[in-house]
Amino acid sequence: MYGEHQQTSNDNACYFGDGELSRADQKDRFVVRFESELQRLDDAGHTLTSWEEENLMGALGAASLGEHDLACGMIESSKRSPPGSSIHQRAFHRQPMSLGALRRRFERLG
């Protein structure tokens, strides 16, 4: 596995004995992580940044395609500051969506 080769741990890679998590367990892990992130942001009274919105919406998109490990990685990415080289001006300016709107999209995923 790549994480083992690099001598680092991969928080998104979890194993049971000889195999990876089942698809149902991957989905359950995603649901718990996404709900936890929404709760963390809500408790902090935090307004989403464009970076957070982009990553969390990407996580919902990945989960809708059954890519739950990728979705969990995107949730983790949303918690970090964006790399300096990835910050770019957008052709449009709008406020990031509210946590309530993000929560409704998450609930529709179910």
Image (tube, grey):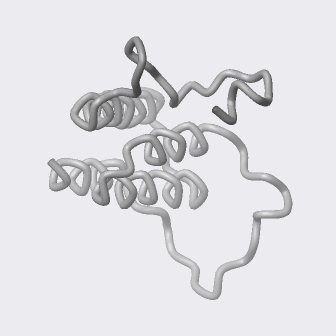
Taking 103 as reference, is 50 above or below it? below
- Residue most toward the front? 18
Residue 10's spot in the image, x, y percent? 62, 27
Placement of the N terminus among the 4 image quadrants: top right
Residue 17's spot in the image, x, y percent? 40, 12
| Count of numbered circles in the view | 0
x 52%, y 47%: residue: 74
Of residues 93 and 77, which is closer to you in this image?
Answer: 77
Taking 79 as reference, is 94 above or below it? below
x 79%, y 52%: residue: 83
- Residue most toward the bottom? 91
x 51%, y 75%: residue: 94
Give the quarter of the image for residue 18. top left
Residue 19's spot in the image, x, y percent? 40, 24
x 38%, y 15%: residue: 16
Give the quarter of the image for residue 21. top left
Q: Is residue 5 left or right of residue 48?
A: right
Of residues 21 and 41, which is closer to you in this image?
Answer: 21
